[in-house]
Amino acid sequence: MTALRSMPAGPSDSARSTTEAWESGDHWNIGDRAVWVAQTGHRLIEFEVTIASPDNGTVLSGSLSGGNEREPFELPGRFGNVRHTGSEQRYCLPCARSLHELRTQTRRWTDLHWGGWSPRAHRKHALLQASIEWQRVIGGFRGTFTRAADVPDWLRQVTAGALIRSYSDSLRVARIEEPIDWPTMFTDHPGDLRIVVDKSLDTDGDLWSRITKAYNAIGDSGIAAHLTVDLEVTADGELVLNPYAVGSAELDTTTDDPEYYLQLDPRHAALIDHVTATLSTGPLQPAGFWPVTSQ
């Protein structure tokens, strides 16, 4: 039998309406079909569940177990984030009203959020997405811009087979993790593609310069430097490059033992200190990368 696990807590305050009938164990019967809901920003997360024990606050969730067995979850806050689905098994007016309010509110927030990008920006994003050829590889998919894509030729060439599907709360086209020398690319092709850095970390207006210095320092030390970037469309419809992280896998000697989640290679201690001070965006993270965005 699958061991009992605890479901991650959701933001129950924002997932509740004024009606709280569902918080009582008497509201539920074993076998009731329901959804666990949580509002995060402009999104409403819904997981299908079946009530396992009204007394213990546990549910079965086929979608979360990752296997054939339906795994029991112990709910933090019991049923504060659970609503009946309104199936033929049982119609529940309080839960139906609450779900309707949550979904309506989420749609309003979603419209407001994505309305921050112009129609031109949405068209640009859609056209770029449609102009990527995806191929299945080990671990997922990798993409290449077709000749129909409205991107510079050099960008199409250097990113061929390197585009990664990456979903976000912005009009992100793709993430790129391949070891492309972006500082040199921008030096060789000035004006073709604008760099947009995280303003919250760009305290001195010189973050891109600091990223470049860090990237070059890593490469000059004799190890492979990596700069992970996102291609995104701005609110007014411009394709830009957004740096995400800089570093090298050779800086982290992490083993499979969870006790050693991040082991810094002592041979590169001086380099790590230098890059950390140069970036001023935070400490080195597992896998050997410094984040250069707060997203």
Image (spheres, helix red, strand yellow):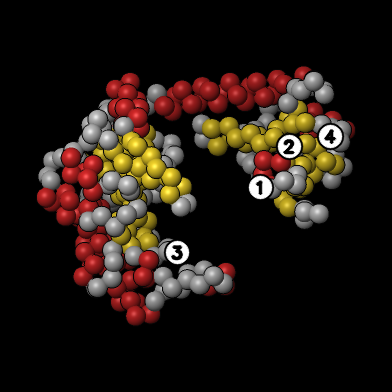
Give the SS element for disc 4. loop
Mark 2 and 1 residues: CB-CB less than 8 Å, in contact? no
Label 2, label 4: how far apart the Cα atoms are: 9 Å
- The three-letter amino acid code for the residue at tag 2 is Val
Question: Which numbered disc flags the more N-terminal residue, 3 or 1?
Answer: 1
In the image, is 5 to the left or to the right of 276?
A: right
The residue under label 2 is 49
Q: Position of residue 82 (x, y in %)?
A: 73, 34
Q: Position of residue 264 (x, y in %)?
A: 41, 74
Give the SS element for disc 1. loop
Picture quadrant of residue 50: top right
In the image, is 114 to the left or to the right of 223?
A: right
- Taking depth in this image into account, of 167 and 135 the one nearest to the observer is 135
Label 2, label 1: how far apart the Cα atoms are: 14 Å
What label does residue 66 carry, if any? 1
The residue under label 4 is 31
What label does residue 286 carry, if any? 3
Question: Which numbered disc flags the more N-terminal residue, 2 or 4?
Answer: 4
Label 1, label 4: how far apart the Cα atoms are: 20 Å
